[in-house]
Image: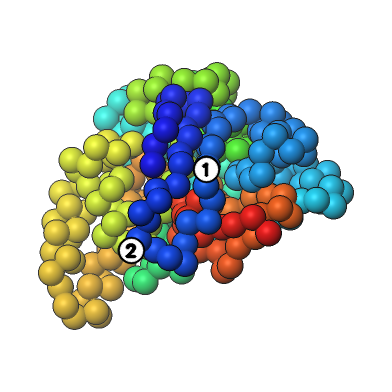
Amino acid sequence: MLEKFEPGVIATFNKNPSYFKSDKGWFDRVECLAINDVKARTNALNTGEVHYMDRCDLKTLDILRQNPDLVISETTGYGHYVYVMNVQKAPFDNPDVRNAIKYSLNRDEIVRKVFLGHGAVGNDNPIAPTVKFAIDPQPKHVYDPDIVKRLLKKAGAENTQFDLSVADAGFTGATDSALLWQEHARAAGLNLNVIREPNEGYWDNVWLKKPFYASYWAGRPTCDWMFTTAYAAEAVWNETLWKNPRFNELLVAARSETDDTKRAGMYAEMQQLLHDDGGLINVVFNSYVDAHTKALAHGEVASNWPMDGLKIAERWWFA
């Protein structure tokens, strides 16, 4: 039962004495702290201020491993780290510009150097490989300076500066990824200007407001759920404001299609449309890397969302 809620600061809950699941809900009280700075989050865990933290700093995992009282876990789910372009605002309203940008980053190097291999390279498709009907659209958006230069010239955007807003509030590693991307882009003839935004207020001041920025998704277990939430024409969380008539026609039709073969074809076409034309840059399908003290115990961890499917308060207990 909610006791206190301060947005962006803290939420505290007390156990409902009438909770209906007799085999769940072992904590008498749960306190959730919003600690956006990853160093402060890590220090809070190391000093015992908190029992659990999500979104670990991958660069300092070895330091956490040296603490004998901590456990680090990694779960692969549907989550993905992205950069999004508002396709209704210039210069991102030009599909050649969007595709030039998609070919201007070396995703393999970013995953290797920034995420230290904790994830799978994205290909501008939000449907995780483990989801039914997922495909890997072709061609792959790999780093290709020649394609970047050709598309920029075609769009008349060779001298355009692309302002990218980032903060690690968007996703852990967003700033480091953007700075490495800036080097890739410069070598490909694309002028990427990285703007470091404050972590505080990022989701109020940048998300859905700036034309080009870092974001993340926990993903969804079905194609329809992911597409309806983030890419349908009128979706409230349509970050890119991409509105493709054919995509939306297929989205509605696929819901009532009972033939799996036909439905698979619909979802394949939708993923291809988004890959080819959308404003999404999916850098990596991230792993959920978290850490907790040995004072906590749990069963099998869910992979659909971080924090054990967002049910850590119900499922975990003190050892």
Image height of 291 relative to 189, above or below: below
Residue 296 position within the rendered picture, expressed as x and y whole percent measured from the top left: 66, 54
Residues packed near mark 2 inside 10 Å, few (<14), some (14 to 19) or many (20 plus): some
- Using residue 246 as the reference point, say whether residue 81 is left or right of it: right
Whichever of labels 1 and 2 marks the residue nearer the N terminus, that label is 1
- Using residue 93 as the reference point, say whether residue 54 is left or right of it: right
Q: Which of 145 and 10 is in front in this view?
A: 10
Q: State which quadrant residue 89 falls in.
A: top left
Q: In which quarter of the image is the C terminus?
A: bottom right
Residue 302 position within the rendered picture, expressed as x and y whole percent measured from the top left: 50, 63
Residues packed near mark 1 inside 10 Å, few (<14), some (14 to 19) or many (20 plus): some
Say which element carries label 1.
strand
Q: Which residue is drawn at 56% across and 57% down?
A: 316
Image height of 206 relative to 172, above or below: above
Residue lying farthest front?
Answer: 17
Q: Mark 2 points at which residue?
A: 222
The answer to whether one can see residue 28 in this image is yes
> Are the two marked residues, 1 and 2, in contact with CB atoms closer than 8 angstroms?
no
Q: Which residue is drawn at 64% across and 55% down?
A: 318
Say which element carries label 2.
loop
The answer to whether one can see residue 74 in this image is no
Check disc 2 and give the amino acid type: Thr
- Using residue 18 as the reference point, say whether residue 293 is left or right of it: right
Q: Which of 176 and 91 is in front in this view?
A: 176
Q: In which quarter of the image is the N terminus?
A: top left
Check disc 1 and give the amino acid type: Arg
Image height of 214 relative to 289, above or below: above
Q: Name the residue under label 1.
A: 29
- Using residue 19 as the reference point, say whether residue 266 is left or right of it: left
Residue 173 position within the rendered picture, expressed as x and y whole percent measured from the top left: 63, 38
